[in-house]
Each structure stands twice: as structure tokens, then as C-alpha cells.
Amino acid sequence: MPITDKDIADLCVGVYAYPGSPPVAWNRFDDGEDSDQICWGVKIIDGCDVLVFRGSTTFEDWRRDFDVWANPFVHSKIGPVHPGFLLGLDQVLDEYRQKSSGKLIVAGHSLGAGRASIFCGLAIVAGIVPVGRVVFGEPRPGFQPLAGLLASIKESRSYRNGKFGTFEHDYVTDVPYRIGLLQYVHPTPLIDVSALPPPDDEWGIFSYHHMPLYAQALARGAIRPPAASTGSSLE
């Protein structure tokens, strides 16, 4: 059976290892305790490596989220990108290439989504073109040169949760803001999905950002393609 975006969403939930959630039997797993401080796992499905980056859970994760938001790092091969998302990914790519098993799909949520997109760019310039990129709650990871590189990926999607018919959505997808010379973009148009958080959610304005909500929305088929999107992303 083909790998579905719902399968990938479930892996993105699983990489967080939430209390009480079903564990994932990863074929490879890095808990982020090494020098790159990036948590990622690989699940091999039908001969394809599904590489999943975890979102923010540690102080270092959050520091990298907000690392020099307005000052992109100009990478010589993939263009200007978010410096906090880029940090450590060259090491992850080196580690992954030592035991890659074939086709590659790259995925992630939040910080992990930004890392997934930049990782795809680094992989492409290293001669590895992923067959898929599926991300959730993705901040804008870089400028147009990165988006141009990722256009070579056959299946590439970025989901944004929200409430259909309103401007309520996952506000993490709005940053970094596009101001003047800071032309951050999403590599692909956002696809709106809808799974509502409880009204008393402790995350407040970021309550639509939870990865389990994305998995719920895909499980129910609560999806709108980019052409029908009603959110407020200004791209």
C-alpha cells in the first residue's frame, strides 16, 4: 500500500512520544542528545525511508526557533535560510547518508517542518532528491532559491490547521514575517486542514498548532486545497 499523508502525520505525532500515545518502532532514532541537538527518526515503509524531524520540546529547540528571526543566513548553495533551522542539519545529513536505504520522504512539524524543508534543499544539492516532503505547521524556512530547489520534489505538501471560513489558523505558519528585504516564503502553497482545539486550550492563540490536531484533520478528510484556502497567509 502507498504511504499516505495520514501515515506521515501519525509518525510526526509519534516522534514526540506523548504520554499514552502508541510508540513508533523506529528503524533509526536520534534523540537529539548529540552535538547537533536535533531529534529525528527514520521509519522504513515499503523500502522508503520516512525521515521525521521533531518540533520544539527543549530550551535549545525554542532558542533555535527564535534565533535571529530577521537576519537569514545566506547559504552558498540553497540561498538565504533561517539560521536556527539550518543549525546542525549538515551533520544530520552526513549521519543519514551512512545508512540510507533507498527512496526518501522528509517530514516534520513546527520547527521540525522548517528543518525538513531545509534538509531537503541540502539533500538535493548533495545529489539526493527526496521523493516526498510532507510538513505540518511550517514556519517560512527560507527565500525563493530554496523553494526553487524543492520544486524538483515530485510530492511536496505543507499543511496549515485552522477554522474554515475564518481567519483563525496556526499562526506559526505566518513567521518569519516578510518585510522589506526579508523575503521568506513557504516552498509550496499551504493546504488548509481543520481540527479545532478545545476552547480552554492552554496554548491560547497557538492552540491550532498541536500536531495531533493535524493528524485528526487528515484522518477525517477535513482538507481544502490551496486554491480554496481562506487563511491569512500573505504570499
Image (cartoon, grey):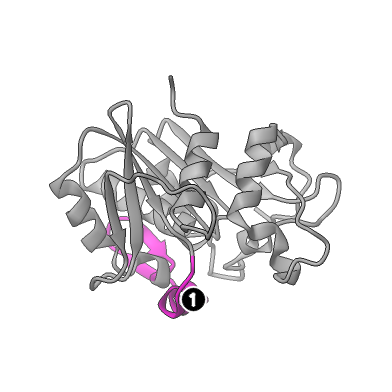
The residue lying furthest to the top in this view is: 1
The residue furthest front is 20
The mark tally for this picture is 1
Which residue is nearer to you in this view: 151 or 106? 106
Residue at image point 18% right, 47% down: 97
Residue 206: x %, y % from top left? 69, 66
- In the image, the segment drawn in magenta is 56-83
Q: Does 142 appear above or below 135?
A: below
The three-letter code of the residue at mark 1 reads: Trp
Q: Residue at x 52, y 59 (%)?
A: 18
In this image, 221 relative to 52: left or right? right
Judged from the image, the secondary structure of the residue bearing numbered disc 1 is helix
Q: Would you say residue 116 is visible in this rendering?
A: yes
Q: Is residue 63 magenta?
A: yes
145 is higher (above) or lower (below) than 106 = below
Quadrant in which residue 15 is drawn? bottom left
Residue that mark 1 sits on: 62
Quarter of the rendering containing residue 33: bottom left
Circle 1 residues within 10 Å: few <14, some 14–19, many ≥20 = some
- Residue 222: where, in percent of width, then height? 72, 36
Q: Is residue 230 above or below residue 204?
A: above
Q: Is 64 in the magenta?
A: yes
Res. 142 visible in picture: no
Residue sitting at x 41%, y 43%: 150
Q: Residue at x 69, y 32 (%)?
A: 221
In the rendered view, does 215 fall on the left or right side of 79? right
Instruction: Pinpoint residue 127: horizontal percent, then vertical percent.
Output: 21, 41
Q: In which quadrant is the N terminus drawn?
A: top left
Left/right of residue 167 with respect to residue 39 in the rendered view: right
Spot the residue most to the left. Answer: 98
